Image (cartoon, helix red, strand yellow):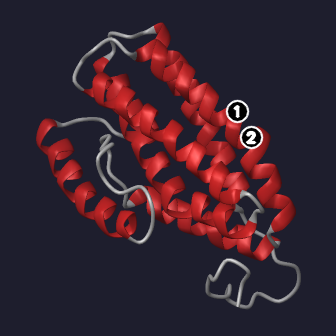
Amino acid sequence: MSALNLPPLPPVGGETTGRNVVDVLNQQHRDLVALSERLAAEPGDKRLAGVVIAELSRHLSAEEQYLYPAIKQAVPGGEDLAARELAEDHTLLVLLKRLDRGEPAAAEVAEAVRRHVAADAEELLPVLMQMVPVEDLIRVGNRVEMAAEAAPTRPHPGTPSAPPWNKIVDPAVAVVDKLRDVATRRTTYIGDL
């Protein structure tokens, strides 16, 4: 059994390889910084705003479901780190809610994304890599990718931000979000811009 209480990886023979949670989140972070900076330069682009809102909403949901619990469990003082990041994420979700209502918040969102990415890159991810075996990092990465696909595409700052409730509520809320996205023909993926 893993240190993070995750099921084992399937046997592959030889060295364990694959995209781990750090790889997954670093790629998402690069995309989110580029998107949010592009939106800050083009604040009137509603299609771009929809993608930023959807990508960030999915990303934050996945981190809340898997990254922060891993930090809490594996890192000494992880409860405090996770609590601080959850508070920052809540602030970012409130900003996204404003942006979703059409309020001018693009520059604030870009700044909040930069702070979020810096905190993860400077504190959370390095300490997680030191404290957790690579097999567990790969498992968490797999779960983050799956959770992001099943996550809401709109900000919901009032929903639970910790397991087990967020793992139940977020996918249910996501169904409604995705139905709204289809009905309004809202673009929600970077590749569709």
SS of the residue under disc 2? helix
| Residue position marked by numbered label 2 in the rendering | 121
Question: Percent from the top left, x then y, of residue 85?
Answer: 58, 44
Q: Where is residue 75 in the image (x, y as percent from the top left)?
A: 76, 63
Q: Please, what is the three-letter code of the amino acid marked with disc 2?
A: Ala
Q: Is residue 134 above or below residue 191?
A: below
* Rendered residue at 70%/33% (across/down): 118
Q: How crowded is mark 2: few (under 14 residues within 10 Å), some or many (20 or more)?
A: some
Q: Nearer the viewer, residue 48 or 99?
A: 99
Residues 74 and 116: in front is 74
Q: Name the residue under label 1.
A: 118
Between the residue at mark 2 and the residue at mark 1, the CA separation in whole angstroms equals 5 Å
Residue 34, given in percent of the width and then of the height, sits at 58, 25
Q: Which amino acid does label 1 sit on?
A: Ala
Residue 20 left/right relative to 160: right
Q: Residue at x 70, y 91 (%)?
A: 1
Quadrant into which the C terminus falls: top left
Place of residue 15 in the rendered image (x, y in percent of width and height, measured from the top left): 88, 79
Position of 55 with respect to 102 (left or right) is right
Q: Can residue 189 be seen in this view?
A: no
Who is closer to the viewer here, 160 or 122? Answer: 160
